[in-house]
Image: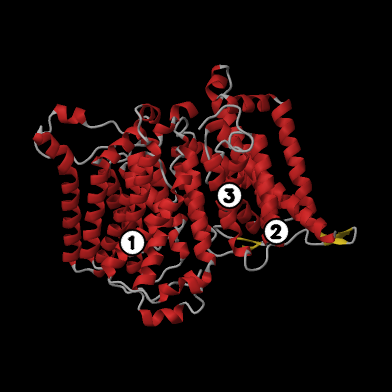
Amino acid sequence: MTDVLEYLVAALSGGGIYALLTIGLALLFSVMGLMNFAYGELIMTGGFAMYLLRDAPWPLMIVGVLVAVVAVALLTERLAFRPLRGASPLTLLIAAFAVSIMLQNAARMTVGPRAKGVRPWLEETISIGGVGVQLLDLVTIAVALALIGGLVLLLRRTALGVQLRAAAEDFEMASLLGVKANRVIASAFAITGVLGAVAALMLILKQGSVSVTVGSVPLLIAFVGAVVGGMGSLVGAALGGFVLGAVTAVLDAALPGELAPFRDAFVFGLVIVMLATRPQGLVPAPEARV
Amino acid sequence: MAAQRLREGVWPPVALAVAIVVVAALAGATGDVVIRRVAILALINLVLVVGLWTFSGVTGVVSFGHVSFAAIGAYACAYLTIPVAMKRGLFPEMPGFLDFLLTVHASFPVAVVLSGLAAAVFALVVAPAFVRLDGVQAGIATLALLAVVYNVLLNWEEVTRGSSTMIGVPADLRLGTAAVWAVAAVAIAWLFARSRVGLRARAAREDGAAARSLGLRVVADRTVAWCLSAFVVGCGGALYAHFITTFNPDQFYLGLTFVLLAMLVLGGIGSLTGAVVGVAVYSLLAELLRRLQGGSWTGVELPAGTAEVVLAALLLVMLIKRPRGLTGGREVPWPARRGPRAAAAAPPAPRPGAAEGGGAAA
């Protein structure tokens, strides 16, 4: 029973973080056909902001992380992806790869290649029904739920949300009907920035340190989650990310020592099988776009 | 007619081969050890990029996973060429069913070919999962292949030594040998692209639906391209192993993948000439930037990573300004009397991935 509760908390918090990441990926993919390979570097940016602001009070640091990540997200949109609007998804994927390498090496040039520690926070364990649960995991679950709820409200209830959904469904038609392309895409990038910043905070606090390549593994897992869930569908992506994050977290806790290192091989093997057998994902997009 | 066949069918690979040999000879003639090493590395990259082009250029499906074939080639070659006396010590816990790896040995050229074959066999086994996919889905699936192979190489420590380096591979790759392999890769790629299967695969690249409606078996043709290109890339990986001699799985991951893709896109994925030009330009730039970063010219040492930032930015600018690459999808033109007709005959090359319905997704 105690084991079950422990796994449940691990699954919910791991799944929550990855749901945020895959929603970010799927949003950009459905609006402009971009599989954002540079998404991992948003996590890296957030991590380095945490490192640089390690002596600042917590609220200031959180704001700093949000500002830094959103700024980088918007900057990549303006400099790299806006000029490529209308290019094929594949060209965009290669471009995003280039952006990812640029950001990684820019960080290597400025902050340095070695892993940096961040200030620990929310490390206390509290007892629920006799089971020790780390406060960070609970906060992660709460924040992920709140953000996803907020995003649903934004998409359903605001003018921007309607425009975003319209653009995701049919970008050309939406622009013909007066949706401002630049504004709606920049907003999508800003939203992915916020989601990425929060995911970065939670992931880096969990890991305790940040390095140049800190975003690679989360990015690949989020990719897989988005593919498994269905790349063009936000609900599908959220579901896929959640399932994958939860499975990864549970495998982490439950796999025997010898098999644990091969976890990622199984996770990435899953994406190949999925793409080969059901390329549209668990929840297909309303309109096939690739 | 014969003259035209000569110009379009024979001249481009011959010109490329001559260029490779001349550059290699010049690099050898300088007697400078650094220049020689840069040239060898460029020639190895040429084998890898031309191998990648054999699939991605011909079929139009960009692969992010070919570096895994290079990794398999490199590891296979290591088992074949590390002296037998050393191997027992290097792999004390080799599982029983792989024990033969500790006793086999082959001469360097044979080992390279066998390594390429190992990569090709692996490619054939996994092919059904990849050859049906197009565009961004193929990109992600091949990326996942890369991640799986990397993960297994990194963690199967009894067999691969994991993240501790593979050592003991002889350092016997000479400039001349590398040049021979580069020319061979160009020849294989060209012959394949002009072959029946290659032509069919190129037809499917231009218009998949039309090719299928004509009864072309796109999947079968792509499987051939996939395995052949894995063979060439596997050979390239084996050469790379003999060049760096100590390596671990990190050498065969996203970093090398980026370099190969950048070279291919820079030169232009639409033509074999593009692949070769891309390797030449990228290698030259990378070496210049390395020297600039080291500060031997300016006296100012730039922080590590500068060269990579510049090269990645360059790739990005290229994708924005000239998505078809430096060559624009053309092969080496016939040097003399290039009339307007010859220019008009140059085939239109798509943007990378345009065949996958770029318009529909815009």
- Tell us which disc is closer to us: 2 or 1: 2
Viewer-side residue, A279 vs B13: A279
Looking at the picture, how far across and down is residue B211, in whole percent?
A: 35, 30
Q: Secondary structure at mark 1?
A: helix
Location of mark 2 (residue) = A206
Q: Residue at x 29, y 50 (%)?
A: B281
Binning the other alpha carbons within 10 Å of mark 1 as few (below 14), some (14 to 19) or many (20 upward) gives some
Q: Position of residue B19 (x, y in %)?
A: 18, 52
Reading the image, the residue beneath label 3 is: A270
Mark 3: which amino acid? Leu
Give the secondary structure at mark 3.
helix
Q: Is residue B33 above or below residue B207?
A: below
Give the crowd class for mark 2: few <14, some 14-19, many >=20 residues within 10 Å.
some
Residue at the farthest top position = A177
Between B275 and B304, the residue placed more toward the observer is B275
- What is the three-letter code of the residue carrying label 1? Arg
Give the foreground label among 3 and 2: 3
Which residue appears at 44% of the width and 52% of the height? B125
Say which residue label 1 marks.
Answer: B291
Query: Residue at left 42%, top 49%?
Result: B312
